[in-house]
């Protein structure tokens, strides 16, 4: 099954092992919480899976983050009101491992400080309504759990969208370069 863009960036390329993106400015995924902001214009390169299917998605991320809230990682999505994004987010001059879970149109945000590694490895595993998010710092880092999150189950007639995402929310940037390496989705047997 092929991948497609939701909000395709102006500059990107891919080969057998990597997806390279230069983010567009003023792009993000966020819903309501804290400041009422609603944005659904971040970049998301995904494929569709049957709604009842469990899976594990993995990717290694290398980014040249430099402006507040530059971000990139994995995303799972039902629609604009139900999605999870996780990966690196650049806040106050530092990298953080970050998760935003959005359910029924409300976003929450959690971060874990990391040591600004050259690469952050991510693993997202879906089992029914549970999403397990793990991260590892650097090529040799061991995976640690970042979050166990609820995510609504959907039926087999609906699609679950799974892929890589990136965004640059700031007005004061021209975006940044990010590389997604070894992106892989392994589907488990249908329930």
Image (spheres, helix red, strand yellow):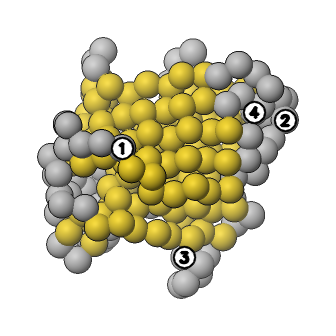
- What is the spatial separation of the Cα atoms under label 1 and label 2, in whole angstroms? 31 Å
Residue 31 against residue 118 in the figure, above or below = below
Q: Is residue 44 visible?
A: no
Residue 66 to residue 157: above or below = below
Earlier in the chain: of badge 3 and badge 2, it is 3
Q: Residue at x 66, y 70 (%)?
A: 106
Q: Which mark is residue 143?
A: 1
Which of the numbered marks, if any, corresponds to residue 16?
A: none
Residue 168 is left or right of residue 124, and the answer is left
Asked if labels 2 and 4 touch by Cβ distance under 8 angstroms, the answer is: yes
Q: Is residue 121 above or below residue 27?
A: above
Judging by the rendered image, the residue that carries numbered circle 2 is: 155
Name the image quarter holding the C terminus.
top right
Give the image quarter of residue 19: top left
In this rendering, position of residue 119 left or right of residue 58: left
The answer to whether the residue labelled 1 contacts the one labelled 2, judged by CB atoms less than 8 Å apart, is: no
Number of the front mark, 3 or 2 = 2
Q: Is residue 42 left or right of residue 68?
A: right
Residue 80 x %, y %: 65, 55
Marks 3 and 4, how far apart in space? 28 Å
């Amino acid at each position: 099954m092929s991948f497609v863009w939701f909000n395709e960036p102006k500059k990107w390329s891919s080969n057998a092992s990597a997806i390279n993106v230069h983010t567009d400015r003023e792009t993000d995924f966020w819903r309501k919480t804290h400041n009422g902001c609603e944005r659904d214009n971040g970049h998301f390169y995904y494929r569709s899976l049957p709604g009842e299917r469990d899976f594990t998605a993995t990717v290694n991320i290398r980014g040249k983050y430099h402006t507040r809230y530059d971000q990139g990682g994995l995303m799972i999505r039902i629609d604009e009101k139900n999605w999870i994004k996780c990966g690196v987010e650049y806040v106050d001059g530092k990298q953080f491992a970050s998760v935003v879970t959005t359910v029924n149109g409300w976003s929450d945000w959690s971060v874990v400080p990391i040591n600004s590694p050259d690469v952050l490895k991510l693993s997202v595993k879906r089992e029914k309504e549970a999403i397990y998010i793990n991260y590892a710092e650097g090529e040799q880092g061991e995976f640690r759990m970042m979050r166990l999150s609820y995510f609504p189950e959907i039926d087999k007639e609906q699609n679950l969208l799974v892929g890589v995402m990136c965004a640059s929310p700031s007005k004061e940037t021209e975006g940044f370069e990010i590389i997604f390496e070894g992106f892989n989705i392994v589907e488990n047997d249908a329930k």
